[in-house]
Image: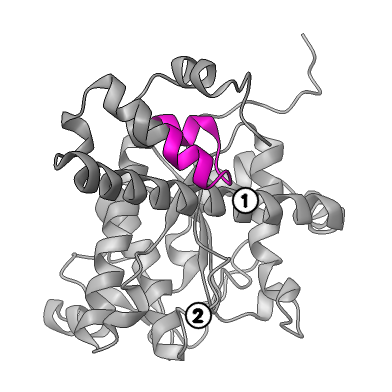
Amino acid sequence: MNEWRPKRINDCFHVYSDGTRLDVLYETDEDKRFMMNLIPIASHFCGLRVICPEVMDTHFHVIIRGPAEKVEKFKREIKRLLVRYYRKDGRGEIVKNNVWIKADAIQDEDELRRKIIYVLRNCTEAGFPLLPENYPWGPGKAFFQADDTYTHKVSDLSYREACKLFRTRVHLPESWRYNSMGILVPRTYLDMTYIKQSVFTSTRQFIAFLNARKSDLTDMESADARSFMEQRDESKIRELAKTRSMEQFKRPIKQLTQSERIIIAKQLWDERRTFSVKQLARATGINVDVLRAILHQPSDKQ
């Protein structure tokens, strides 16, 4: 048995929204405050624990812990409440093109540490001039320093006051605290027991990962962007396939015969080859191996 190998895990996920979008999703401090509070509130509602949150101008990141099915519920809840927030505020155009949210399973404890550092350093990579611990829309100094100075207890608020301040009807834990900006203090809701026992057991270990190679973080950022581009591209293919089905056969693509689906798949492949055979197969409902043979493509295009 190789003791040096990192321990495998199956209950931690990196959840994030589309960092490639050009518009500013969290334009104001109020937008960022809403999102910083939404993350722990939605996590609590879904039965998950937060490990590391961060909100940027165009997207958010959060490392969370819990069962995969609850993570999917968390994604739906975040998306639903974000859309409601912007529409209620008269800015529905910000989310009219959908809110893309992904969840990547984290395989082992080393990957978990790298992901946390990646999230923490997102602000400095985007130009924040100070250390990550000074960024107001992240975990701050939560990992190694309790900072309850000038904070207030959620338990001191009435239910109605808490609903108004945090824009939620969810009953929040009495142990949670909030600061003068109305932001729930990360230290009070993060899974600190797990962080101290399984993630960063010492300050030295934390510093070592904080100084991880820049290339490691760049690779993560590129993978995130690539994933979203693929997801967005596949949605476009599905829309094209649906439109072509109605135009040519006057029926939804699910009602087409195999030969009719193949006709549409061939047309789309000839017209626009920026997607993979797998994506086209999913959009048209054709077995991927069958479609590869028809298109004379032994494997997906890179």
Q: Is residue 266 above or below residue 40?
A: above
Q: Residue furthest top?
A: 1
Image position, residue 27 (x, y; %) = 47, 87
Image position, residue 283 (x, y; %) = 36, 37
**Closest to the observer, 261 or 58:** 261
Q: Is residue 174 above or below residue 116?
A: below
- Left or right of 253, for residue 24: right
Badge 2 element: loop
Q: Which residue is drawn at the image coordinates 29% and 86% (left, top)? A: 91
Figure quadrant of the C terminus = top right
The kind of residue tagged 2 is Asp
Figure quadrant of the N terminus = top right
- Left or right of 197, for residue 244: left
The colour scheme is one colour
On residue 23, the disc is: 2
**Observer able to see residue 200:** no
Mark 1 Cα within 10 Å, few/some/many (few <14, many 20+)?
few
Image position, residue 112 (x, y; %) = 64, 43
Which span is picked out in magenta?
Answer: 266-281
- Left or right of 79, for residue 11: right
Image position, residue 175 (x, y; %) = 34, 65
Q: Main secondary structure of the magenta part?
A: helix
To which residue does mark 1 refer?
226
Is 179 magenta? The answer is no
User: Marks 2 and 1, how far apart in space?
Assistant: 18 Å
